[in-house]
Image: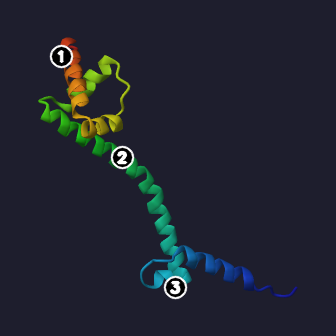
């Protein structure tokens, strides 16, 4: 049986790898071996960071809401608890946007949440 060489397929594979590695620094954009390793690592980081981005955004929203609550003399935990007890369906992203764009509405939300959370007695531990 004759020996088969991968001529065209190998060239296409190399071209595909180097095309994906375009813009990388050093030999990672010109040598197939290094480019392949760089692409794999980039894929791992991209997969991981799609989840990290969600965590980071939630932390940012909570930080903004906390700052807005402190400006109004209350705590984040009291505010969120009051909203839950009041039956609000606003999520943290929406609350963050309201705190930035419509401070008067956030004042009303804050006052209502604090009123509800202080009106109900705390559970005995």
Disc 2 vs disc 3: Cβ atoms closer than 8 Å?
no
**Which element is circle 1 on?**
helix
Checking the image for residue 41, the label placed there is none
C-alpha span from label 2 to label 3: 35 Å
**Percent from the top left, x then y, of residue 87?**
35, 19
Q: In the figure, residue 1 lies in which quadrant?
A: bottom right
For label 2, the crowd category at 10 Å Cα-Cα, with few meaning under 14, some 14 to 19 and many 20 or more, is few
The residue located at (42%, 80%) in the rendering is 25
The residue located at (42%, 84%) in the rendering is 26
Say if residue 75 shows up in the picture: yes
Q: Earlier in the sequence, mark 3 or mark 1?
A: 3
Q: Quadrant of the C terminus?
A: top left
Q: In the figure, residue 114 lies in which quadrant?
A: top left
Query: In the image, which is nearer the foreground, mark 2 or mark 1?
Result: 1
Q: Earlier in the sequence, mark 2 or mark 3?
A: 3
Q: Earlier in the sequence, mark 2 or mark 1?
A: 2
**Percent from the top left, x then y, of residue 123?**
22, 14
Look at mark 1 in the image and give the residue it sits on: 118
Asked which colour scheme the image uses, the reply is rainbow
Seen in the picture, residue 118 relative to 105 is either above or below; the reply is above
Judged left or right of residue 40, residue 55 is left
Judged left or right of residue 39, residue 99 is left
**Which element is circle 3 on?**
loop
Look at mark 3 in the image and give the residue it sits on: 30
């Amino acid at each position: 049986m004759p020996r088969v060489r991968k001529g065209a397929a190998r060239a296409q594979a190399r071209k595909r790898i180097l095309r994906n590695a375009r813009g990388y620094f050093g030999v990672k954009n010109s040598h197939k071996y290094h480019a392949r390793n760089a692409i794999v690592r980039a894929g791992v980081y991209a997969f991981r960071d799609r989840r990290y981005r969600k965590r980071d955004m939630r932390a940012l929203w909570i930080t903004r809401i906390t700052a807005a609550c402190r400006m109004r003399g209350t705590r984040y935990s009291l505010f969120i608890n009051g909203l839950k007890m009041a039956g609000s369906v606003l999520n943290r992203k929406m609350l963050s946007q309201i705190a930035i764009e419509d401070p008067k509405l956030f004042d009303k939300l804050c006052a209502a949440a604090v009123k509800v959370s202080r009106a109900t007695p705390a559970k005995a531990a």
